Image (cartoon, rainbow, N blue to C red):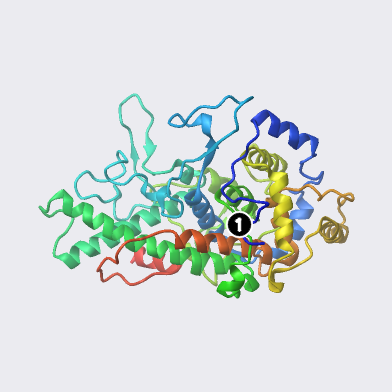
Amino acid sequence: MPHNSQNFDPTLENTESLRARRAGAQAKKQVIPDFEFDDTAWRAACKSNAKIPAGYTYLSQLMGHDLGKTLPGNQVPWTAHHDDNATPGARYNLIENPLTLETIYGKGPFGTHGLYHARNCLFRLDKEAKIALRIRYTSLEPSEPMLADMRNRDTLMLHKLAVLWMQYHNKIARQIMADDGFDEDSHAERAYFFEVFTRARQVVLRAWHKVVMQDILPTIAHPAALALDDAALESVFLLGDIPVLNGIMRAFHALPLARYRLSAAQIFPFGQLRAGKTGELRNWRIDWAKFFGPNAANKTGFSASYSGLFTMLSGRSIMEADLKSAIIALPYDRLHADVLKAHANLPTALKRDISAVELERLFNEKATAIGVQGVPAGAFSQIPLFLLLMLEAQFYGENGGLGPFGSGLLRRFLTHKIASINAGGAAQTSVPAHSSISEIIQYVET
């Protein structure tokens, strides 16, 4: 089904009040099936899917942050407020320009206080820093890491990836200055340094788009979706920003390991990695090769499984929180129906049986094999898109990645999003073109 279907407008906002949406969801019984998706035996069986280098879970989380952060309009002070009971609920995306690394750059040197050096427009990082320096604006305020988007502190790994991109920008900017015969301590005008910032950002943005399309996508997507030609890809349903964030990106609750190998000699519990409590953080080094590349020691994969390792949260509570945010974001039951209709018009390479009946059969077959109670008939008839895609990935994915349908949805969305971005003219620099996170890591660390 093409994206301009009369049944679905990908830019559509929910036209119901929040109270009506919640009541409607309850009436339609849009609930997570009564199954312990973080059950120890179930998760252990799902780990046969753990074939993706685990660093891509965090890199994809960074991509998700870069795509958007949606809030109800009445929670954003510079938008019109709405009466919850009488006025349609509007959503506001706090990311103004998705997939342009706004989560790293913020508003730029002129608009993000404290993130950049005032004169040379470089990120305020020591050349060897692995985490963002901390800043206290007044003696009465707590110190905060200098990150444009504090969501990039969700885990220590994510924090270090954000800093990696900041260091990447700084190194490219310094190379541009060297090509011009300047350096960061020269007496050039600030306008020159801002021009260098702009030229470096163009290089970084092109590299980011290559990483998204040539590294992240091939790692997590199904080969059948990657093999589609342009005409076939355009026949795939085009999701809007909100369903991508609340559908595909919420399916990224993959299989974090109980313990991660971070360096040659030590392993650390996942909870410590998530909380950022491991070692002396300022000097603590991740061995990136253990998280990216063909020889990565830590692997993960997509499945209908949630981690029970999140501090103070169970897998079910995370799943219910996902469902709640999805229902509030847009009329999920209608989106779900339209997506399933679109599935019927997919290219043959992407078609698999994802009906509730077949998914329940496959699910219960696996549950029986490991000796756990399955789900009753009809349990998957009203599941949200993110759980549908997790199930499709578990039964039809390859090498731990998304299934063909979810992969097609993601590839088309990313293709259209990047095509809509004008990165500007190419900056003349001796920096080589990078298209993978491993290449960028090697460039930054040498």
In the displayed structure, does residue 256 sit left or right of residue 194? right
Residue 286: x %, y % from top left: 46, 57
Residue 19: x %, y % from top left: 68, 28
Q: Quadrant of the C terminus?
A: bottom left
In the displayed structure, does residue 192 sit left or right of residue 307? left
Residue 223: x %, y % from top left: 63, 73
Q: Residue at x 62, y 70 (%)?
A: 225
Above or below, comparing residue 112 to residue 363 in the picture: above
Work out which residue is located at the far left of the displayed protein and give it.
187
Q: Residue at x 53, y 64 (%)?
A: 216
Label 1's element? loop
> Label 1 sits on what residue type?
Asn
- Is residue 258 something one can see in this rendering? no
Above or below, comparing residue 436 to residue 335 in the picture: below
Q: Quadrant of the N terminus?
A: bottom right
Q: Residue at x 49, y 69 (%)?
A: 214
Residue located beneath label 1 in the image: 4
Q: Residues within 10 Å of mark 1 (few under 14, many from 20)?
A: few
Above or below, comparing residue 361 to residue 435 in the picture: above
Q: Residue at x 70, y 60 (%)?
A: 342
- Is residue 20 something one can see in this rendering? yes
Residue 422: x %, y % from top left: 37, 60
- Say which of 291 and 22 sits in front: 22
In the displayed structure, does residue 330 sit left or right of residue 366? left
In the displayed structure, does residue 444 sit left or right of residue 20? left
- Say which of 23 and 64 sits in front: 23
Q: How many marks?
A: 1
- Say which of 235 and 141 sits in front: 235
